[in-house]
Image (spheres, helix red, strand yellow):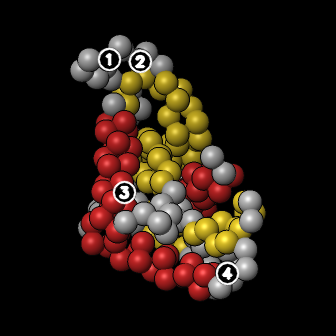
């Protein structure tokens, strides 16, 4: 995974700290036994955040949709990944807090060298936000910096553009 996915958990931790709360990343906790699988006595939990009133044990997943994916397929992948994060959060035991499934959706657009497709990057980000809105999650937030301030990784004869992130 790219470093940007680790940054997303840290940004939630920073939000908790800025409000006087507590945050722990990657800690051991007990999990409930699932049907047809062995009991997991201890397992990593992605994030614990708390405020003065309550705490959340978070299981986080990251999804990397591409411009090539069909619209229906993206919405289905988003829903499936969020359900998986929520189910895994519900398996946590002994944390004395609310389970919370979190999904980071980090879109990427491949632009071949000598191409003017860079204009597709903000359009794809807007399309993704519309799809998440149509799914109607309990809550979501997104950040897409000004046009041209993308995270870019060279790949072969082109570049992958990462315009921002949606957190559900």
Which is closer to the viewer, label 3 or label 2? Answer: 3
Q: Check the image and report above or below for 18 versus 39.
A: below
Residue matched to label 1? 37
For disc 3, the marked residue is 78
Q: What x and y, as percent, mark residue 97?
A: 38, 40
Name which quarter of the figure residue 56 lies in. Answer: top left
Image position of 10 (left or right of 152)? left
What's the distance in space between the residues labelled 3 and 2, CA to CA? Answer: 26 Å
Residue at the spot of label 2: 40
Compared to residue 84, the image places residue 16 above or below, namely: below
Using the numbered discs, state the Cα–Cα distance from disc 1 to disc 2 in whole angstroms.
9 Å
**Label 1, label 4: how far apart the Cα atoms are:** 49 Å
Comes first in the chain, label 1 or label 4? 1
CB atoms at circles 1 and 4 under 8 Å apart? no
Reading the image, the residue beneath label 4 is 115
Q: CA distance from mark 3 to mark 1?
A: 25 Å
Please tell me whether mark 4 sits on a helix, a strand or a loop.
Answer: loop
Q: Position of residue 41 (x, y in %)?
A: 43, 15
Observer-side mark, 1 or 4, equals 4
Q: Name the mark on residue 80.
A: none
Residue 139 shows in this picture: no
Q: Who's the residue at 36% across and 36% down the image?
A: 88
Q: Whole-Å distance between the Cαs marked 4 and 3?
A: 29 Å
Q: Are dots 2 and 4 in contact, CB under 8 Å?
A: no
> Residue placed at 57% from the left, 69% from the top?
109
- Secondary structure found at label 1: loop
Is residue 29 something that shows in the picture? yes
Front position among marks 1 and 2? 1
Q: Earlier in the sequence, mark 4 or mark 3?
A: 3
Q: Quadrant of residue 89?
A: top left
Which one is closest to the eye, mark 4 or mark 3? 4
Q: Is residue 134 left or right of residue 17?
A: left
């Amino acid at each position: 995974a790219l470093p940007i996915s680790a940054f997303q958990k840290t940004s939630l931790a920073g939000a908790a700290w800025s409000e006087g709360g507590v945050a722990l990343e990657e800690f051991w906790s007990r999990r409930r036994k699932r049907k047809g699988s062995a009991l997991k006595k201890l397992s990593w939990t992605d994030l614990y955040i708390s405020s003065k009133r309550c705490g959340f044990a978070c299981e986080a997943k990251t999804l990397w949709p591409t411009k090539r994916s069909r619209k229906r397929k993206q919405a289905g992948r988003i829903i499936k990944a969020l359900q998986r994060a929520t189910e895994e959060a519900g398996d946590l035991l002994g944390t004395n807090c609310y389970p919370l499934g979190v999904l980071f959706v980090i879109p990427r657009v491949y632009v071949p060298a000598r191409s003017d497709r860079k204009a597709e990057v903000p359009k794809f980000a807007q399309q993704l936000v519309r799809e998440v809105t149509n799914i109607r999650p309990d809550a979501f937030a997104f950040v897409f910096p000004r046009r041209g301030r993308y995270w870019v990784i060279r790949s072969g004869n082109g570049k992958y553009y990462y315009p921002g992130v949606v957190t559900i």
